[in-house]
Amino acid sequence: MKHISISFFSLLLVSLSGVAQETKPAQADTVAVVPVKADRYGLRVGLDLHRPARSFYDDGFKGFEIVADYRLSKKLYFAGELGTVDYTVDDDVINFTTKGSYFKAGIDINTYENWLDMENMIYIGFRYGFSSFSQNLNSYTIYDRSNYFPDVTKYPNEKYSGLSAHWGEIIGGLKAEVYDNLFIGFSVRLNMLITDKKPKGFDNLYIPGFNRTYDGNFGVGFNYTLSYFIPFYKKKIAPKVEEKKTK
Amino acid sequence: MKRLIASIAILLILSCYLLSCEKDDLCAEGSPVTPHLVIDFYEEDNPSQLKTVTEMRCFVPGSNVIVPFTQGSRLLLPLKNDADSVKYVIQYKYTAGGSTISDTDYIEIKYKRTETYVSRACGFRTTFVLDNNTNESPNPVITHFTSGDPFISDSEIVNYNVDDENEAHINIFF
């Protein structure tokens, strides 16, 4: 189910970015008349589409994420995410619920050379992430290799509050303008846990924003975003030929 | 534009790969899990000499499931994860003077339990601390199947903490 939804979103993204390219030439013509190119600067705010979709098909998961970035220079963006998660994990021997919220802040660097006035991005990014959350140990089955007696399952329903985690992320992603000021985006994240406050007598098997934890302190994440660009001002791009003359 | 499409493709492939590479969720061999009680057999007449047993059957009264035991001088008994004592039937068969003799005892072990977290795949395990062996409250309690004297003449607790299976916890003499 998870992989089907991922494939679905991937198809959606590819098809939408296809649409974006088709609409471009008409705009490009009009802009080409303008003698001086200008970059638009402003704030882009949006929503992650994957988390609400997953809330719909995965009974144990509820979550949403707001994303935003602000253009600092031609290639550099200040970017961040804000989200909440309420996730019940039902593993073979443990069932627990993680609840909490997180924020991530950092930069995106656009590596894509746009044509004319296009504002698409293929970027790498870095984030610092922080999460505040609680773990609720719902039930566990005692692991006994002998299998002589029937399995014993306990329901402690014990809540561990006041937990937190800090981590860093390396991001690869893209954003494509599909309609005027409307962007669809996708990013893959590699997370590295810096430190976390663990519950006494249990562990942080899932951290909001960081996602599932592994032994080696790393994790993975991704998002599909739909965002809207609010232009604040334009910055003219001086033609390179003129720069040479002034020297 | 080709670069954009190629990048999309690379990102999608990468994300599918990252999502599918979830670690094996099996509890690895050698992980600390709920231990068995380790019982060593010693010669009644020569208490420092391990006794080799060829045929012994252990099970909980009322059950027809036998605890695995092939032969040797060491028996591994599972303890109950939901009770503070467990009682086993021990059927011992041996040959004496050309005929096969079968003798049966009860052994009851009393203990306290602690549950501790191990890992995602192994979950929680139980560790046990054996109750003291006193005159008023012997531990283990060894009684004959009927009313006679048990074939196990003596027992001693050599390790009260049952948290691994490396060494014996109880020695029995017969």
Image (spheres, rainbow, N blue to C red):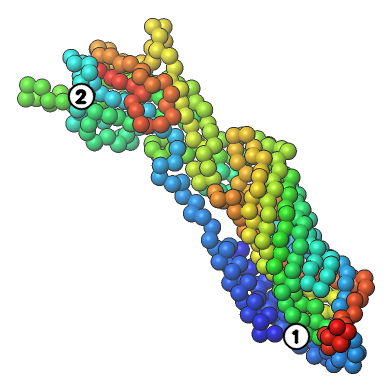
**Residue A143 appears at what percent x and percent y?**
47, 39
**Which residue is nearer to you in this view: B30 or B70?**
B30
In the image as oriented, which residue stretches furthest toward the top? Answer: B135
SS of the residue under disc 1: helix
Residue at the image position 61 percent from the left and 63 percent from the top:
A2
Please, is residue A113 above or below residue A92 in the view? below
Q: Chain of mark 2?
A: B
**Residue B132 appears at what percent x and percent y?**
43, 14
Location of the N terminus of chain A by quadrant is bottom right
Which residue, given by chain and number where applicable, does mark 1 sit on?
Answer: A21
**Which residue is nearer to you in this view: A69 or A111?**
A111
Count of marks placed on residues = 2
**Residue A121 appears at what percent x and percent y?**
75, 74
Residue at the image position 60 percent from the left and 46 percent from the top:
A205
Asked which quadrant contains residue A139, the reply is top right
Location of the C terminus of chain A by quadrant is bottom right
Same chain shared by disc 2 and disc 1: no
Please, is residue B10 above or below residue B88 in the view? below
Which residue, given by chain and number where applicable, does mark 2 sit on?
Answer: B51
Question: Crowdedness of circle 1 by 10 Å Cα count: few (<14), some, many (20+)?
Answer: some
Q: Amino acid at mark 1?
A: Gln
